[in-house]
């Protein structure tokens, strides 16, 4: 991976850790805890101290069945957080988690450095906003809307179909003027996927590799972990760390997590094991 995000050049195989800041009342794992600006800012600062490489600020829950949020309300939630972080001298790159072009435009003006679009440019104006700003974009795979995506979890070969749909999103980005070296691809664990689909994507993540585009995976506290273990969202850290380790061993460059300190340690150890295996070579 070699990509400039804000003031930082992300250069190398990673792993790089993206910390989650949900400025929402209804996110599936921590809804309401960081809705107020000061709480969200304090949380972002804490994630930086825990070893995050960048933070992802979102103002709309993307859990299955979540109701839509108007752009005005989403802006009210995220822009003050981004502006306050920059006013405090926050130096880490900031990602804005939105699919709306208007929200992305104003968040970038407030100091965001990256757009994390879970819909892969469903808003026809988003590509132009990203291209004009000259920033990178995460293109995530999903189908349908947050309200109906669970009903869209029907695949013959989930890896092949997700790969094809991600390549279509990449083509949309390039057509809008976003160069490939500013695109990160995300398979969208849990977005229009059941537990079996998410597990298969993680097991075969290397098949989604597209030349020039690093991979980001967000397994944190997701429902597939609950399906396997029976644990509620707040108790899925061990399962999250197992998934993070698998991603790093498979060469994924970025992982998006809620629990940065624990994930940072797990990712670094997995990367050391990966490096030792490569250095040892074949037996």
Image (cartoon, helix red, strand yellow):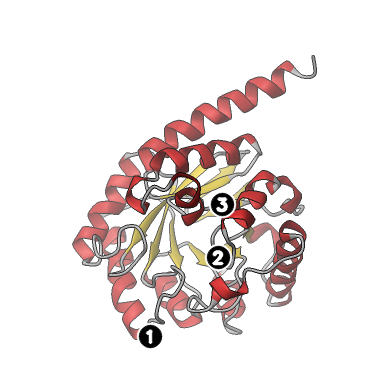
What is the secondary structure assignment of the residue under circle 1?
A: loop
- On the image, numbered disc 3 is attached to which residue? 217
Real-space CA distance between mark 1 and mark 2, rounded to the nearest whole angstrom: 21 Å
Please give the name of the residue rendered at 60% of the width and 44% of the height, measured from the top-left corner.
Answer: 253
- The mark lying in front, picked from 1 and 2, is 2
Label whose residue precedes the other's in the sequence (2 or 3): 2
Mark 1 lies on residue: 70
Give the left or right position of residue 225, taking residue 88 as reference: right
Q: Residues within 10 Å of mark 2 (few under 14, many from 20)?
A: many
Quadrant into which the C terminus falls: top right
Which quadrant of the figure contains the N terminus? top right
Q: Nearer the viewer, mark 2 or mark 3?
A: 2
Which of the pair 108/243 is nearer the observer? 243
Left or right: 221 with respect to 9? Answer: left
In the image, 109 versus 54, the foreground residue is: 54
Q: Relative to 46, say whether 265 is above or below.
A: above
* Residue located at (43% from left, 68% from top): 63
Residue 192 position in % (x across, y down): 58, 68
Give the residue at the far front of this rendering. 230
Task: Please state if 236 lies on the left or on the right of 37 as rendered.
Answer: right
Q: Which element is circle 2 on?
A: loop
Quadrant of residue 277 within the rendered picture: top right
Residue 126 against residue 180 in the figure, above or below: below
Q: Which residue is mark 2?
A: 191
Q: Secondary structure at mark 3?
A: strand
Q: Circle 3: is it few (<14), some (14-19), or many (20+) Cα within 10 Å?
A: many
Chain-order first, disc 3 or disc 1: 1
Residue 173 lies left or right of residue 236; in this view the side is: right
């Amino acid at each position: 991976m070699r990509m400039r995000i804000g003031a930082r050049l992300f250069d190398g195989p990673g792993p790089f850790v993206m910390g989650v800041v949900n400025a929402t009342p209804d996110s599936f794992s921590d809804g309401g805890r960081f809705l107020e600006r000061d709480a969200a800012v304090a949380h972002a600062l804490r994630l930086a101290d825990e070893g995050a490489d960048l933070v992802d600020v979102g103002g709309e829950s993307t859990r299955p069945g979540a109701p839509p949020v108007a752009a005005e309300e989403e802006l009210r939630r995220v822009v003050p957080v981004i502006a306050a972080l920059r006013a405090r001298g926050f130096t880490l790159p900031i990602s804005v988690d939105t699919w709306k072009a208007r929200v992305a435009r104003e968040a970038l003006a407030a100091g965001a450095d990256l757009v994390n679009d879970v819909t892969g440019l469903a808003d026809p104006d988003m590509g132009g906003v990203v291209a004009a700003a000259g920033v990178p974009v995460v293109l995530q795979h999903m189908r349908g809307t947050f309200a109906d995506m669970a009903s869209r979890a029907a695949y013959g070969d989930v890896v092949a179909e997700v790969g094809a749909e991600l390549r279509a999103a990449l083509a949309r980005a390039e057509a809008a003027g976003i160069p490939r070296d500013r695109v990160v691809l995300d398979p969208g664990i849990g977005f229009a996927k059941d537990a079996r689909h998410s597990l298969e994507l993680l097991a075969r993540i290397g098949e989604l590799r597209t030349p020039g585009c690093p991979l980001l995976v967000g397994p944190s506290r997701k429902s597939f972990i609950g399906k396997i273990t029976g644990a509620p969202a707040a108790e899925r850290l061990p399962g999250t760390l197992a998934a993070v380790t698998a991603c790093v061993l498979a060469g994924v460059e970025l992982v998006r997590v809620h629990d940065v300190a624990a994930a940072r340690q797990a990712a670094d150890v997995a990367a050391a094991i990966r490096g030792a295996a490569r250095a040892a070579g074949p037996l």
